[in-house]
Image (cartoon, helix red, strand yellow):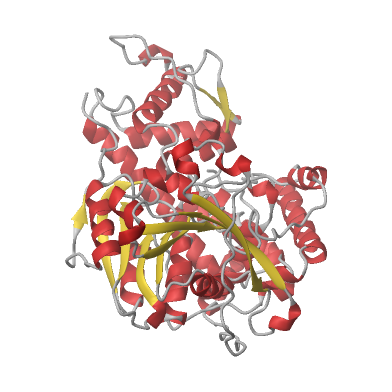
Amino acid sequence: MKTPPRRPLARLIAVAALVAGATGGIAAPAVAAPTPPTPVAWGPCAYEDLVTLPATEVLRYSCARHPVPIDPARPQRGTVELALMRRAADNPDTRIGSLFLNPGGPGGSGYKLPQAMKNYLSPEVLSRFDLIGFDPRGVGRSSPVRCFTTQEDNDALNARISAIPLTEEQERSTNAAYGDYGRACGQLGGPLLNHMSTEHVARDLELLRAGVGDAKLNFLGFSYGTLIGATYANLFPQNARAIVLDGNVDPLLRTTNGLEYDRQRTEGFELALDELLTQCDSAGPAACAFSGDAKAKFTELRDTAERDGTLRFPALSPDWRMTFEAFTNFMSTAVYNQAVELPTVAILLQSAYDALHPSGARARTAATPAITLPPNAFEPSRDILPDSPYTSDDSYSAVNCTDKPFLHWPGLVPPIADAWDRAMPTFGRGLAWGDPGICVQWPFAARWAERYTGPWNRSTPNPVLLVGNTHDPATRYAFSQRMSTRLGNARLVTVEAIGHTILGRSTCADRIATDYLINLAAPAKGTVCQPNEVAFPAR
């Protein structure tokens, strides 16, 4: 993207100084003396939550609402209720225990995850474990944090926000809207807003473990859920049995330097896109329609979309156009979760390139197949398997702005975005206006509430099983490598794949996870797996 020529160098130097200083931490709060656990009171689930299941499956499910203290250090201040769903083990006689699930986010609903995970977990795991999904505090059905009283208020504020501000007026409007958003959350978020850190979620998880009667915790977390698992493993190491973390964060960097964490996360998206284009060229035109100096062609498409505001995609229809923002979101989704299969992405990109160069359009031996895009093809990337839309609550920002410290001020977001744009031209500007823009205007008490910043090296009785893709955009491979060295007892499985998280898409990794969950068998150091499908299969 082009950089507006207006930022004095001194401001960028100030940004660098702030980044270098963002290394402080916040000590974990004192916690009230433990009390006997309150058993989870299971009962029938609501009809609408099970209506899509076959009749033979419905009887396996039960649901509950379980109270946990808003503030574990001061339980007298009241409770919030967590919503849980349980799928009973297929074979109760060989049942090992419960397997708690978290899809990531933060803000991803885990309540109905036991239903979805049937497509991710092996029959052996389904046979031996109850699957328990839950909405963490402030999310979905669990006392959601809300910063608006009406959808109209939410829509009015969002209308003032540019996801990728390109002009000074868009920057001013977006910064002002973020300030109003922070003030609205301070006024309407309630007492829970100051207790949304991942540490609180990990402490809730300990209460749930005890509440279902398990002696030790079994946990499967994706993406942000890996921070929940790592935090639990260090707060309650002796209570951990089997913890599987897929798509890992760097826990130390995330909780001590939000700006640098997000910069490296943004770089992960760029690296994944670069690998996608590299593999496209290697696959050749039969497998990848966009091959043939794919990186140069993509740069031209991106720059044209920014300059003209839209880009035409004749493969969808003769005058189908994507806005610059939609194009950026489309590409982030392509490397994130392949909502559109990558060969189809290649056809779309080549059709856009041909529209810019009609005289040199690549001859086709057959008509381009009709292409339709799923509704989520243009959505900004979050984490896997969300059950409720982000507009239903404000937990995403509530967690991130508590966990990730940002020490700059709102006026520095534009030069940060400029610097990221120069270094990371596809995703840098947009992601710089994400948490680095929102969180610096978050309510002060919530921004500086207690959060867990370590130590991260406490040893669990069994190794924590980590799984990381070599080209994961949102939780880059370097984060998984760092997680493996920061934890006191961990084993990393590498999967040579593009995309965010991998379990359910790599038979090799799935078998390792199954053996670990059931038999506590840790894989050999340096284990490398392949995905079930390559990015561009030969045709």
Asked if residue 404 can be seen in this view, the reply is no
Frontmost residue, 366 versus 127: 127
Q: Quadrant of residue 239?
A: bottom left
Residue that lies at the very extreme toward the top in this rendered image: 366
Residue 253 in picture, x, y percent from top left: 46, 72
Give the residue drawn at x 57%, y 23%: 321
Asked if residue 416 can be seen in this view, the reply is yes
Residue 240 in picture, x, y percent from top left: 38, 75
Q: Is residue 449 above or below residue 348?
A: below
Left or right for 183, reference 300: right
Residue 205 in picture, x, y percent from top left: 52, 70
Q: Is residue 170 above or below residue 69?
A: above
Frontmost residue, 317 versus 128: 128
Give the residue drawn at x 37%, y 28%: 346
Q: Is residue 379 above or below residue 468?
A: above
Frontmost residue, 264 versus 529: 529
